[in-house]
């Protein structure tokens, strides 16, 4: 067996202690970087969803205006009024009630 200098043994021991001591800080830094990256992606997705909703809102408003301008007679207006009173609010209220029942 070869003789190893005490200085070499001490240097290796100090290096090992340094690595073990720094490991928690490096791991925590990695976790923070991952959280920051995930938060960034979350905000990017939120902005993308808002942009898509704005495009849909503009398109639906445009279609609504086109339909309003295409109504020619009072008979069509009366039919549109009847269609508008088909109980959509009642359906939405029923759906909200059902969804709230799942919470509890």
Image (cartoon, grey):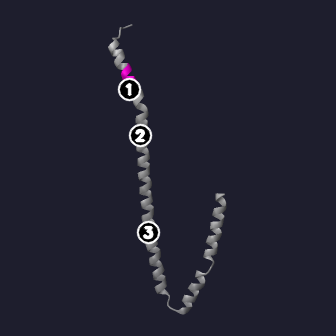
Identify the image quadrant of residue 43: bottom left
* Circle 2 residue: 30
The 10 Å Cα crowd at callout 2, few under 14, some 14 to 19, many 20 or more, is few
- The residue closer to the viewer here, 55 or 7, is 7
| Secondary structure at numbered mark 2 | helix
Task: Provide the major secondary structure of the magenta segment.
Answer: helix
Residue identified by numbered label 3: 54
Q: Is residue 28 above or below residue 6?
A: below
Question: What residue is drawn where x is 36% and y is 23%?
Answer: 15
> On the picture, is 11 further left or further right than 42?
left
Measured as percent of width and height from the top left, residue 36 is found at: 41, 47
Rendered residue at 58%/87% (across/down)? 79
The correct choice, above or below, for 83 with respect to 99 in the image is below
- Residue 17, percent from left and from top: 40, 24
Q: Nearer the viewer, residue 63 or 32?
A: 32
Closer mark to the observer between disc 3 and disc 1: 1
Nearest to viewer (mark 1 / mark 2): 1
Q: Are marks 3 and 1 in contact (CB under 8 Å)?
A: no
Mark nearer the N terminus (3 vs 2): 2
Q: CA distance from mark 1 to mark 2?
A: 18 Å
Quarter containing the C terminus? bottom right
Q: Provide the secondary structure element on which disc 3 rests.
A: helix
Span highlighted in magenta in the image: 13-19
Q: Dot 3: few (<14), some (14–19), or many (≥20) neighbours within 10 Å?
A: few
Which badge, 1 or 2, is on the more N-terminal residue? 1
Q: Earlier in the sequence, mark 3 or mark 1?
A: 1
Residue 30 lies in quadrant: top left
Q: What residue is disc 1 on?
A: 18
Q: Is residue 37 left or right of residue 82?
A: left
Above or below — where is 13 with respect to 56? above
């Amino acid at each position: 067996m070869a003789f190893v200098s005490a200085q070499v043994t001490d240097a290796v021991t100090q290096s090992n202690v340094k690595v073990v001591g720094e490991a928690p800080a490096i791991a925590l830094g990695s976790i923070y970087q991952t959280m920051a990256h995930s938060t960034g992606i979350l905000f990017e997705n939120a902005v993308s969803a808002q942009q898509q909703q704005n495009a849909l809102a503009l398109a639906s408003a445009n279609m609504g205006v086109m339909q309003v301008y295409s109504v020619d007679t009072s008979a069509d207006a009366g039919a549109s009024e009847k269609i508008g009173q088909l109980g959509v609010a009642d359906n939405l209220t029923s759906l909200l009630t059902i969804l709230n029942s799942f919470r509890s």
